[in-house]
Each structure stands twice: as C-alpha cells, then as structure tokens.
Image: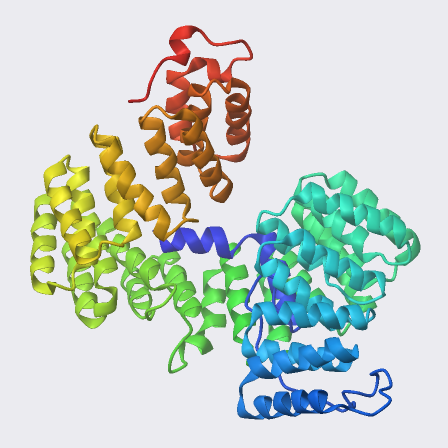
Amino acid sequence: MLMSARIEEDGMRPRSLFFLMVAILMGSGALAGCQSSPTPRPFSEDPLSRAPAIKRGLDAQGLAALLEAEFAGHRGDFTRAARGYLSQGERYHSSALASRATLAAQLARDDELLTRSALLWSHLQPDAQEPRQLLAERAAANGDWQQALTQLLAIDARGGDAELEAFVQEAADAGADISAMLERLQAHAVNHPNQPAASIAAALLYARQGEFDTADTTLDGVAQRFSNTPSLWLARSQVAMARQHFQDGLKAAQHGHRLAPGDARFLLAMAQAYLALGRSEQAEQQFDHLLNRMPDNSNLRLSLARLYLQHHAEAQAERVLAPLLEQEKPVPEALLLAALTAERRGQTDQAVYFYEQVPPGEHFPGARARAAHLLVEHQRLEEAIHMLDQDRNRYPEQNAELLELELSLLDSSGQSQRADRILDHAIAQSAPDNDALLFMRAIRSLNSQDLSAMEQDMKTLLERDPDDAIVLNAYGYTLLEHTHRYREALDMIQHAHRLAPDNPAILDSLGWAWFKLGQFDKASHWLNLAWQAQPDAEIGAHFVEALWRNQQHDQARQLVSEMLERLDHHPELDRLLERYPGLESTTHPSTSETENPSS
C-alpha cells in the first residue's frame, strides 16, 4: 500500500518511461493505454462510390438503412449508426462505409462493433493503416500482444509507420512473451528486407534481456543499409544507455538529432543522457526546448518530473510540476509526484498535504495510505488516525476502505482492542447499511481465531443477501480450513459458483472442497480451471497437491517446476514441498509421501 513504492516501481522504470514519453512527443498513446476519443471528421467521399453496380440503383432496403444510420449518428446514437453502416458496408463491399462504421463504433465505445468494423475495413482496403492500428490497440488492451503484433507487422510490411519500437517495450513491460516476439520480428525482417523497423525493435528486446552484444550486432546490420534512419540512432542511444554507456548514448542521440533536427525524441534522449552523466544544466536546456514546443502538455510535464526523480533531481522535478499544481484541480498524478518530491526532500508535512489533496478515484486509497504511514513513521499515530477519521466523514463512500486502513495502523501499533471498539462502533452507527463493515469484522474475528463471531457476521450477511457470491465463497472456504464441515462448505461454494462461474477464487474453493472430501480427480479438474484463470501461488499449491494425491506425480512435478520458474514468491508451495519431498524428485516417492493428507 505504500504509494511511494508504487511510483518508484511502476512509474519510473527507465526503458518504460522513455518510450512512454516518446509516445507523448509523437502525439499518440501507448497501445495498452486509454484509447483517445476519436475526433469526427468530414466524410468527403461518396459512401457508395466504390460499391458494385446495381442494375436498378439503390434499393429501398439499402437506402432506408443508410438514412437510418445517418440520422442515428446526428442524434448521437452511434451504436445504431455503426450497425447500419456496417451492415451496408458488408452488403456493398464498401471500404468507405466500413470506415464510417468504425468511426461510429469508436464514438459509441463499443469494442465488439469496433473490431468487426475495423476488420471489414482492413479486408476491403488492405493498404489502409488506420483500421489495423485500431485492431492492434484493441488486441493490446485485451492483452493479446501477438495479435496486436500481427496487425502492426502488416502495417510495416506495406511501408507504414507501425511504431514497433515503442510497442515491443510496452508489450514486454506487460509480460508478453519476448522470445515469441523476437521470433516473429526476425522472420518479418527476413521477408521484408527493405523495412528496418522490425530489426531495430528486435535489438531493443535483446538489450532488454541483457544480450547487448546481439543488440549491437543487429543494429550494425541495419546501419549497413539504413545508416541515415533516425530510429536506428534512437535505438543505439537507448541500447547504450541500458548498458550504462552514457557517453555513447549521448553521441548516438546527438547524431540522430543532426539527422532529424525537428524530431523531439532526440531532445529527450540527449536530456536523458545528460542526466545520467550528471550534467543537469544541459539536461534542463533540452527539457526546456521540449516544454517550449509543448507548453500546455500536462503528460509531458509529468513524465519529465518522473525522469528527474529517477535521477534524484528533486529541485528540477519541483520546478516542472509547479504549473500543474497551480491549476484549480491538479491532476492526481501531479499531486502524487509532488508528494514524493517532498518526501525525498524531508518535507513530511508538505508530502502529507499533497497526498491529502488527491481526490477520490484510482489513486485515492494509495495516497491516503502513504500519508498515514508517513505520519506513523514519524511517531505521529494520533495525527494519522485523526486524518483518517476526518476523511471518513468527508468521503462517506470511502468509509470502509479508510476504516480498514485505520484499523491496520492500530493493529500494527499494538492497539487491536481499540481497533475492535472503533469497528464495533462504526457497525452500530451505520446499521443496516454496514455489509462491508460486517464482512471486515468477520475476517478480523477469523484472524483472531474467533470462529463463532465470524460465523455470526457471515450468517447476518447471508440473511440479508443469500446470493452474495463473495460471502458464500469466503464462508465456505473458512469452513474448509477451520472445521470438518466439508459438505456444508461445498454446498455454499457450489451456490457461489452458480452465481459467478468464472471467478478464479471460487473455482479454487470448489476444487479444494472436493480435495477435502477425498475426491482428488474432481479436485484436480476444478483446480486446473482456477489455475488457468489465475496462476497464483496459492491456487498452484492446491493444484499440485490435488495432482499428487490423485497419483498424477509427473504432472505435479511439472507444475512445481513451472511455478518455481514463474513465481518469485511462493510460500504456499515451499510449505508443500516440505510435506511432500518427492515433488522435487525425479524418482517415485515413498508410500508415506503419497499418503500424507492435508486434512
């Protein structure tokens, strides 16, 4: 919950930050980020100009459908407009109508319609870049990085600018398979030798994996034919920076700037190198050039502040953020960065002030948590409690979340009884609209080994809503872990599963219930589904044990190997390996190992 850690870890990774800023400078967002709202543009071409000839002209059905779509668009009913244009685009094989359907689907924010329309557009007009870019954005937003790459490579193959370099960094940051991307980029480079972007993107991925010599060799190959390509020198700069050859990174960026003096990316790359070399004044000059070009670009200021903080240049970060903080309603990211800057400079009260200004939304819980922990770190617990009490009154919709934070602070300070009294009082004050607080108390009772109190609150919650899948699952799983009432637990969990059949936590509970009942084959089935949906350590440990008890030893060992390779932290698996030593062995386990039950 420490906000400063989140900012450090998620917001200031050098590779990610550089290419995020490149996207800002080029006027586009990262593929996996928010898709900007489309700007309607005049439709200058007759929608039916490319339609096949119709012997008797436009029939009544086609005319009616197009008029209905056009009127729907004027009324703001973009979903109906998109459907109308799409149906007639399919009928008349008109790329112009498919294009209009795509625009309407964007305005309607209908992903399914957008995908269908863009697919039709790209099929009817293969050389058009925009529909493939949109399809790539949708695929990336859904985590389908390979499909996104397919669309971008199609753009590159036709000589378009697919921004492959920024894409592969974004995909790698999101956990895409780097080896698979490299294989496809290399094959594309062979099949399209006159397009250097795939090789340059591959070099960046090699550098990301620490294969710097391979990255340099790849870029040397590009330089033999495309030495005047600006993106080559941008990549050379970034590879040199990644291996901490900062002077080489600066020289490559300067060379690229000479080739393309109007390309702001090289101002950014030079500034990045100057900062790394400790030449902050020269870095500031480059940043000022960028800000002069884009004085009202808030995203650029935020990214520059992150880059300054990455290099511990707090004073410069403060200067860049100042105009954003003077706005009537500063954006949350500016407040968070200002708070982190104040923290770094030892200005605790100022940092707490900025954290407190973050409005309700995505960053609200983390900001309040960091403010409270910061006060506690300076032995100011009562001030933290008072701040959270005030926020609970000011933001009643955040009451449960803020109260949970307050209770955790008291628990960690050895004041659990006081925390219990505060929670009891809050529950009494908010009855009967206190479901979240009752659930919170039930979990606290469970942690205190008070099963009776936990059950009392859970039963109250189920009396109010017998179909609350989360409560049913939590109650059932608790019975599995702390009682022998396995059948009762199974009934609850099956009810939860009927309500939320795809919930990984419920699938895990269902598998674990069958495990407790000795039905290891059924347990393996449900735990496999849970693992496929959410491959975390706890689900994986349950699945391993079910496979092992079901005599599927090879599969269990294979899953153990996969978990050890994939997961950095796996205490549940570590405990399981202590109980079943044969899981790590290539020989068959002893009888005692196979019969060691978990319950």
Nearer to the camera, 379 or 174:
174
The residue that appears at 50% across and 66% down in the rendered structure is 316
- 378 vs 56: above or below: above
The residue that appears at 19% across and 38% down in the rendered structure is 447
Nearer to the camera, 582 or 512:
512
Q: Is residue 439 shown left or right of residue 195?
A: left
Q: Is residue 482 visible?
A: yes
**Residue 313, percent from left and from top:** 50, 59
Q: Is residue 392 shown left or right of residue 45?
A: left
Q: Quadrant of the C terminus?
A: top left
- 61 vs 183: above or below: below
Nearer to the camera, 179 or 319:
179
**Residue 346, percent from left and from top:** 33, 57
Q: Is residue 380 visible?
A: no
The residue that appears at 35% across and 31% down in the rendered structure is 514
- 41 vs 379: above or below: below
Give the color scheme: rainbow, by chain, secondary structure or one colour: rainbow
**Residue 238, percent from left and from top:** 70, 53
Could you say which quadrant of the image residue 467 lies in? bottom left
